[in-house]
Amino acid sequence: MVLADVVSNEKRSVFMLCNEAIVRGAIEADVKVAAFYPGAPTSEVLDTFSDAADYFDYHMEISANEKVALEVCAGAAFAGLRSLTAMKSVGLNVASDTLLVLGYTGVRGGLVIVVADDPHAHSSQTEQDGRFYAPAAYIPMLEPSSPQEAKDMVKKAFEISEAYRIPVILRTVTRVNHQSGIVQLEDIKRTPYERVSWSSLNEQYITLGAVAREKKLKMLERAHRIAESFEKSEFNTLIEADTETGIVTASVAYLYVLEALRMLGLESKVKVLKLGTTYPIPKRLLGLFLKTLRRVIVVEELSPFIEKEVCVLAKEVNPKLEVYGKLSNTFSEAWEFNPDIVAEGLASTLKLPYATFSERLHTAQKLKMGLPDRYPTFCAGCPHRATFVALNQALKIQASKGMRHYFATDIGCYSMWVFPPISHADSSLCMGASVGIANGLAHAIMERPVAVVGDSTFFHAAIPGIVNAVHNGNKFTLIVLDNSVTAMTGQQSNPSTEQTAGGKLGKKVSIEAVCRAIGVEFVEVVDAYDVKNNVEIFRKALEFNGLAVVVSRRECALYADRNKRRKGFPITPYSVDKAACKRLYTCLRTFYCPAYELDEDRQPRISPELCDGCGVCSSLCPLSSIKQVKA
Amino acid sequence: MSFNLFMCGVGGQGLVLLTSVIGDACARSGLNAVTGEMYGLSQRSGTVSVHMRIGESVFSPLIPYGEADVLMALEAVEAVRYIEYLKENGIVLMNSRIMHPPAETAHLIADKNAKYITLDDVIGRLRKWTRNIAIIDALNLAKDAGNINAENAVFLGCLSTLKAFPLEANILKASIARAVPAKTVEQNLKAYDLGRDAAYRQLCKLVDCRENV
């Protein structure tokens, strides 16, 4: 249904996720190249591009990482093609090397970079404010608050990008990306996809030394021109009121402000300046607004980015202006906003009576006492769970011989190993860092470092760490959990998948061949489900005097099940034979499958609607009491 | 006029699809709709929540605390987890199904005296917030409809009986038919009907419902 709306030629109102609206906007704007590495909360941008690939002639790919994705788009934009990439906040950290150079070189075709911050770290390792990249790179930035605005801004961003020959950042936050709303579809006007004759373009994209110094001056001048044009941008809107109190806000915080004003009965009683162009800041517009005020409240996530601009401007245009925001501790720099937090901040600043929400939360908290937590966990049938059961047994055997370990996990489904009831990891940082960290630990601790990465992380950021280990002789064990897809973000393809974006056939890159080519002397490939045999292989890998790599392979259960259903293969659940079960709980104690619970006799019971039929638990039971249900 | 619906459940129960069905029905009814969706880290078995806001004067994608007209929980324990969003004496529409997370089971194995949380315990907690609690055996109704994955359609059927819910049955059903795989349309529509009938038997004794036609 949603795909039908994304590709529809009708000009009607539809209900869309913001990430889908971004894609629709790009398609309406005749985007030609799109490249991504998946990451919440932007993954649906990639998925929608992938799903719609059959309907249009754009080239779309899932790249090895965000830096490559940005470079794919930059390459196309150098030649004049409109291109778009989307990445999560920490993805831009990876791509930032290229981003900061693109500020110098510029582009020819429109290049739009969607960057999604994740206030509250809902699905990220850090909360960070990616807006600071825009001034660092002198690259203009737009901030939408809703799906409709995101779609409008994507289209405008292509125009700005081409007018000033510079990439444009569309900065979102999780509550924008994962917000759905009513979106007006407009005309899709596509031109045929055509290659460009590079030699006829007379373009050059170079920056170094003297060239860089020259370009820096041009970059500053360009930023000035863009700021001038943003003074009249339709994305900066003002709600007037007969008062000396005003609010400056942007992004989803604008919607919280509108909601909070409704909650406080202050609709049309406070001025609101909503900024859609947050770099370069339209200083004249902002200055004129500040001049009319006695006090201003800045409502933004996460850092006091606009607030500092307000403070600097106020010094010039209205030195007595009272500025409230994060610097005044009216709001915290930590975590995301919601309507209640904003309402409370406004009420306290305006000295209005407001029944704070903390009492309500306190009552709710009392009702939740002792409620079972539902931590993120591995799916039924997940091969990672089986790998960890075998690895843990191997680690225990080694520990009984006095050989202990350090466990470095990484970013992917397997990072959920840190949550209860397992809670096992010594470190978990960012993409590929487990391998880099293990290189250092190999020289610092007496224990054996064990690093874990997934297949997608392996290609994204782990390979340089392996090269480093081989070259420098750093000794540790690396487990590569190869489930054939980038599972955590929705089972997208990666170099370990036989398909590329849009379901087209792609060449699978062999992880073990890469490791052997680098010169790793211990490389073993195992079936993740084969717990019994894997224990001994993991143990050998822990003892190996050098870098040892074990590739534990088995398709992601969700991905495999989808393929099975497509081909009409049955998924047959297992069940526990109550007569044979002696409540040893071997199936549960080490395995923790979500398809399991205890029945009224406290015997393990498998929910047939949740069981994936992987059979790993059956292989763990010493009494052979878990059997596949006969079809 | 506005209608605030807070939906929650466990990953894999089809909340995302349910959201797009209701949203599509809004778009086709000329109604404004805004949502805030939270899927969690895990693909399955984690907690999932959706703030769904329909009508005028709704701005934020998140419902303010205490402003949800209906808290619809596709898994019973999850209803308590988000209770702060429900308004005083708002409606809880809840599955009788409890999906015990692995951490809770681990606790039972470690402590012989520990017991699972029960539906009665959940209801007892919810009653301290509201008297309007309707419990639906959605899994069995979905099985009766011929599709174990159609719990979400059962719940939409329940929801459709409420007087405050602003969408018409024919539009909802058309949106279901557009959203689900072609071979499951009939089962999902059956699940919707079974959910609606169950609501008329139980929910509508507690709260204002549309006339059962």
Image (tube, coloured by chain):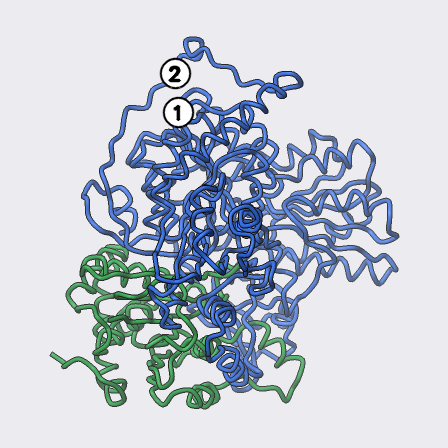
Q: Residues within 10 Å of mark 1 (few under 14, many from 20)?
A: many
User: In the rendered structure, are the residues bearing label 2 and label 1 in contact, judged by CB atoms less than 8 Å apart?
Assistant: yes
What colour do you see for chain B?
Answer: green
Residue A394 x/y as whole percent: 75, 57
The residue carrying mark 2 is A196
Q: Could you tell me residue A80's position as x and y percent?
A: 40, 21
| Residue A599 visible | no
Q: How many labels does the image show?
A: 2
Q: Name the residue under label 1.
A: A81
Q: Residue A216 carries which label?
A: none
Residue at the image point whose x is 48% and y is 67% from the top: A346
Q: Which chain carries label 1?
A: A
Instruction: Say left or right for A181 vs A562.
Output: left
In the rendered view, tell whether residue B74 sits above or below residue A549: below
Q: Are marks 2 and 1 on the same chain?
A: yes
**Earlier-in-chain disc, 2 versus 1:** 1
Which colour denotes chain A? blue
Q: Is residue B127 visible?
A: yes
Q: Nearer the viewer, residue A542 or B161?
A: B161
Secondary structure under tag 2 reads loop
What SS does tag 1 mark?
A: loop
